[in-house]
Every structure is written in structure tokens, then in C-alpha cells.
């Protein structure tokens, strides 16, 4: 007798096809039988050791978070309900060009400092790995949800070149090629970049093209956080399209948005650019989160010249009055490249988290509001936060446009990604709410997507991009990574006031046929493992 039968489910299978009613049988971690209602008439229905009554519920593949920042959170917090309760069964880590492998002792410390705002410093975790393969092995000891990894180009550049703003030597480029190849051979699915973050932003297109050629040989894809989401957004998208076409490498555009006032209403221009390339044979996909504000670190807004050399050099420049004034001018007047070429509007920058407890009263306020309470300039407040929090401050940027969000999510290559940062007292609610918000707000309430379309965006499409042969669809023989949700009640509990509230309407989540969420509650099951590249 099989392990489990999910009885009378409305199956939305992840392909975009119409739903159907069926009993779905799971055994040994895989879907072994799907008995549609019409076929079952007059026949004995499948039996199993356990049955789940799915009357009124939708059964879909588990959701794939195409852009996650849980690189340390999965190890720190075995519960990980932030993602498990949303129905996420796979996260793609190593994003935005900065993560924790491959490293040596020097770059590990530098990276920990640079992305404290994303993952915490990590002194509560025994970082006993240095290579991509060793990190994936660590995940294999048991985590809440499955995880795949992208080789982070900024970390690779830090290891081979350092944090200086200069071209790589031929020998350094050879080392970077080797590091990317090693990471792909050890199981990474592609390469990421953070081209508004140091040191990845110092790479010229020729360097990135060479690394993408390596990725393409292994059947991977390139996932850039490109050079501008603001004043130069369309040019930055076009740059990535041209670069990857030259390299023969598939392209996946991370958190594809058109932000700031200069881009209001301009999403159709982006999609026209992408459609032209797709029609000419390019392999392009993208992901978005269903919210208007962005989220990053306060230090990310700094101009690239001020970030050269790494965290200690940044702090030294901030504490020098003359250099700090030059930074202020770039931020407030010129528009720094770290702020996407747009002069910063401090009333749009909300402090979401700090690492230094003495600074906690800033959290939940914009920089302008916090400065007004203290009777000082916005730059004085921002500079003090950067220095006293040692660059660990996280922020929300209220710079998005709802019409752009809706337009982009309808695109034929769209997938879902949370870009969820779990650090800070008031993190962006997308970390806890992205997937139920798609289903509840944009499907049920607004009708921007049909249910079948949306589930395909969150499951089948991303699995195809990741080249996973047995995930992302409800099919016989596929892994039993499954979600049961109520289409009438599913909703994000998280909001900007209470960003860590769990969603409603998702009673069951299974990974490899094991319940990680059962009757709406987290079990103690750690069914997640590293998902490695499928050899081509």
C-alpha cells in the first residue's frame, strides 16, 4: 500500500493547463499515480496508508523562489516558516553576486562584513565550508526546504582580484573562469552578479562575457542584478541581453522592475525590448516580487568609488569629513551609481533593520523622519547609521510603481521571486508573503493572472529555467514537492506593519512526500536538500 493519497483535489499542475479534479497518490517521495475523477467513475479508488481530504483545496507543485537570500537563514533557523508556510519548496540562493562560497579565509571575512545586512554576520554558524560543493554538502545535512545555488560573481572577483576598481589581469581572469567552472561542476545552476554592489560592479562587460561563456558550457544561466533599475534601467537591461547573446548563455533577469520617478509607466518599453530579443532567438526569463518597495542595505546606495576596497575602506571614507561631503554630494545632487543614477530622496528610504541595538529607535522610520526627530540633516543621520552600525543597516526603498509591477508579472517569461531578506526588526513583508500575495491579491482579488497562469509562473516555468527534470509539475514520476491551498482564503498575513505574520489558507506543504506544513502548522521535518545542476 502506498504512503499517501490526496483525495478529491483540484489539481493545478503547473503547466498552465486547466485544472482538473483527481486523487493523487504519493509513495517513496514521488507522485506514483494520478487518478482523474472521470477515470475513477465506477472503479475502486486508490488507497494508501494515509489519506488527506482535499475537498475545496487546490493541489499544485511546490513554489520555487527564484531569488532568495536564505543562504545562512536555512542553517540558522531549522523551522524556516518564513518560506515553508508560503508553500515554497525550493529556494535559489547565491544571489546578487555575493554569498559565502567559493571563499578563502580572507574573502569569507570580507563577504560576511559586506552582506551582514542580508544574512547577519554569521558568527552563530560554523562556516566550515570554502567551496561551492562543500556548502551544498552542508545543506544536505537537512534543511527546511530545498535549495539551489548560483556562483556569486562578486565573491569570485573578491577572491581573484580583490575589492579594487580595476580590470582583471589575464591571470586573474583565468582564475575566475576556473572558479566558476569548479562551482558549476560541484552543482551550481548558474552565475549571479550584483552590478550595483562592490566588487562585482567593477567588472566590465568583456569580463562578464567570459564568465558567462563558462556557465553556458555547463548548461547554466546568468542571473544579474544589473547596473541600474533607475535612470539607466533600459540601457542596463539591453546591456545584459547583448552580453549574454554574445556569450551564448541563457539570461534570467533578477527582480525585474522599473523603479523611481523616471520610470513610471515604462514597463511596456522593457517588455518590448525583451520580446524583440526573444523573437530573435534569445533565451530570457525574469522574476519579480509582487510589491512596489525594494529592499537593500543603506550602504548599497553609496557611489562605487566610495565602496572600493571593501568595508573598512568605506568606513574610513565616511569618517573623513571632506570625503563624506563628497559622498553626500554624489548621493543628494548627482545621483550615485549605487542609487541607480537617481538623487536620493530620503523620505523614500525607510530603516528596516539595524545590527547595533542602540540604534533600534531608527527602525520603522524614514531617514528624513528620523533626522527631523533629532534636529539634524538627513545625510547626518544616514552617515551616523552607516558608521555606528558598521554598514549593517537594511532599508526599504519606496520607489516602485504598481502599474509597472502588474504589467511585468503578465509577461510570457515571468517567474516569482521574493528577494526576501530575513534580517532586521521590520523586514520587507515579501520575505514572508510573496507567494500567497500572488495567489490572493493578484489572482483572486485583482484578476491580473488566472490561477492556472499564476501557478505556472511560480512552479513549472522556474523549474524549466533551472532545468530540473522532475520538479515543477504535478506529474506521475515527479518528486512529491506539493502545496495544498484554499483559493478562496489564501492570503499573505505579512504587511509593512507586521512583516513576519505567516500566511493563511495554506494547510499542507510536502517536500519529497513528507509534510513540512501539516494542518497549517510547521512539523519538525527537515526534508530539504541541495538541488544540484543536472549534467547536460
Image: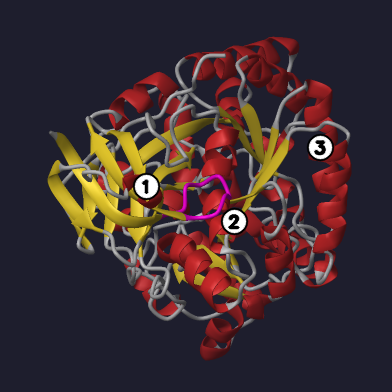
Q: Which residue is mark 3?
A: 241
Q: Which residues are magenta?
A: 11-19
Q: CA distance from mark 2 to mark 1?
A: 39 Å
Q: Is residue 160 left or right of residue 437?
A: right
* Left or right of 383 on screen, residue 427: left
Nearer to me, 315 or 181: 181
Residue occupying the point 79% across, 65% down: 342
Instruction: From the image, give the main secondary structure of the stretch colored magenta.
Output: loop
- Circle 2 residues within 10 Å: few <14, some 14–19, many ≥20: some
Q: Are marks 2 and 1 in contact (CB under 8 Å)?
A: no
Q: CA distance from mark 1 to mark 3?
A: 34 Å
| CA–CA distance in space, label 2 to label 3 | 25 Å
Q: Is residue 40 above or below residue 128?
A: below
* Residue 294 in view here: yes
The percent coordinates of residue 464 (x first, y second) are 57, 34
Residue at the spot of label 2: 453
Query: Which element carries disc 3, helix, strand or loop?
Result: helix
Give me the residue at 68% from left, 49% from top.
306
Q: Which residue is mark 1?
A: 121
Which of the two discs, 2 and 3, sits closer to the camera?
Answer: 2
Residue sitting at the far front: 42
Q: Residue at x 44, y 65 (%)?
A: 436
Q: Which mark is residue 167?
A: none
Quadrant location of the N terminus? top left
Nearest to N terminus: mark 2 or mark 3: 3
Amino acid at each position: 500500500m502506498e504512503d499517501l493519497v490526496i483525495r478529491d483535489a483540484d489539481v493545478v499542475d503547473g503547466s498552465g493547463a486547466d485544472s482538473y479534479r483527481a486523487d493523487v497518490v504519493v509513495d517513496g517521495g514521488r507522485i506514483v499515480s494520478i487518478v482523474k475523477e472521470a477515470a475513477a467513475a465506477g472503479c475502486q479508488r486508490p488507497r494508501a496508508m494515509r489519506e488527506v481530504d482535499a475537498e475545496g483545496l487546490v493541489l499544485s507543485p511546490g513554489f520555487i523562489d527564484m531569488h532568495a537570500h536564505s543562504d545562512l537563514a536555512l542553517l540558522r533557523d531549522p523551522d524556516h516558516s518564513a518560506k515553508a508556510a508560503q508553500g515554497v519548496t525550493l529556494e535559489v540562493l547565491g544571489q546578487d553576486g555575493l554569498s559565502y562560497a567559493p571563499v578563502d579565509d580572507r574573502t569569507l571575512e570580507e563577504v560576511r562584513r559586506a552582506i551582514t545586512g542580508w544574512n547577519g554576520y554569521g558568527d552563530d554558524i560554523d562556516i566550515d565550508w570554502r567551496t561551492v560543493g562543500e556548502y551544498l554538502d552542508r545543506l544536505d545535512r537537512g534543511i527546511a526546504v530545498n535549495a539551489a545555488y548560483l556562483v556569486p560573481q562578486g565573491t569570485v572577483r573578491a577572491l581573484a582580484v580583490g575589492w579594487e576598481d580595476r580590470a582583471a589581469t589575464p591571470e586573474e581572469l583565468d582564475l575566475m573562469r576556473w572558479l566558476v567552472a569548479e562551482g558549476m561542476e560541484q552543482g551550481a545552476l548558474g552565475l549571479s552578479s550584483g552590478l550595483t554592489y562592490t566588487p562585482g560592479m567593477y567588472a566590465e562587460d568583456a569580463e562578464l562575457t567570459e564568465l558567462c561563456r563558462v556557465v553556458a558550457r555547463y548548461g547554466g544561466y546568468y542571473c544579474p542584478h544589473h547596473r541600474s533599475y533607475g535612470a539607466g534601467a533600459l540601457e542596463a537591461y539591453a546591456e545584459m541581453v547583448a552580453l549574454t547573446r554574445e556569450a551564448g548563455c541563457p539570461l534570467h533577469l533578477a527582480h525585474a522592475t522599473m523603479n523611481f520617478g523616471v520610470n513610471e509607466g515604462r514597463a511596456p518599453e522593457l517588455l518590448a525590448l525583451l520580446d524583440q530579443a526573444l523573437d530573435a532567438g534569445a533565451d530570457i526569463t525574469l522574476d519579480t516580487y509582487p510589491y512596489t518597495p525594494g529592499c537593500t542595505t543603506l550602504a548599497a546606495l553609496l557611489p562605487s568609488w566610495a565602496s572600493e576596497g571593501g568595508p573598512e575602506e568605506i568606513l574610513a571614507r565616511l569618517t573623513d569629513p571632506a570625503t563624506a561631503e563628497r559622498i553626500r554630494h554624489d548621493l543628494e545632487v548627482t545621483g550615485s551609481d549605487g542609487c541607480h543614477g537617481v538623487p536620493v530622496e530620503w523620505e523614500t528610504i525607510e530603516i528596516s533593520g539595524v545590527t547595533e541595538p542602540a540604534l533600534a529607535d531608527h527602525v520603522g522610520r524614514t531617514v528624513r523622519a528620523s533626522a527631523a526627530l533629532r534636529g539634524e540633516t538627513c545625510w547626518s543621520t544616514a552617515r551616523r547609521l552607516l558608521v555606528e552600525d558598521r554598514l549593517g543597516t537594511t532599508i526599504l526603498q519606496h520607489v516602485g510603481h504598481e502599474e509597472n509591477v502588474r504589467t511585468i508579472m503578465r509577461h510570457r517569461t515571468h517567474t516569482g521571486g521574493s528577494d526576501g531578506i530575513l534580517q532586521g526588526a521590520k523586514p520587507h513583508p515579501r520575505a514572508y508573503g510573496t507567494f500567497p500575495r500572488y495567489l490572493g491579491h493578484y489572482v483572486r482579488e485583482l484578476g491580473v493572472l488566472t490561477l492556472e497562469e499564476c501557478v505556472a509562473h511560480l512552479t513549472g516555468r522556474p523549474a524549466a529555467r533551472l532545468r530540473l527534470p522532475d520538479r515543477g509539475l504535478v506529474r506521475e514520476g515527479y518528486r512529491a514537492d506539493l502545496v495544498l491551498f484554499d483559493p478562496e482564503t489564501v492570503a499573505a498575513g505579512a504587511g509593512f506593519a507586521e512583516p513576519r505574520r505567516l500566511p493563511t489558507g495554506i494547510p499542507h506543504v510536502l517536500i519529497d512526500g513528507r509534510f513540512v506544513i501539516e494542518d497549517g502548522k510547521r512539523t519538525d521535518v527537515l526534508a530539504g536538500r541541495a538541488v544540484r545542476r543536472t549534467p547536460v
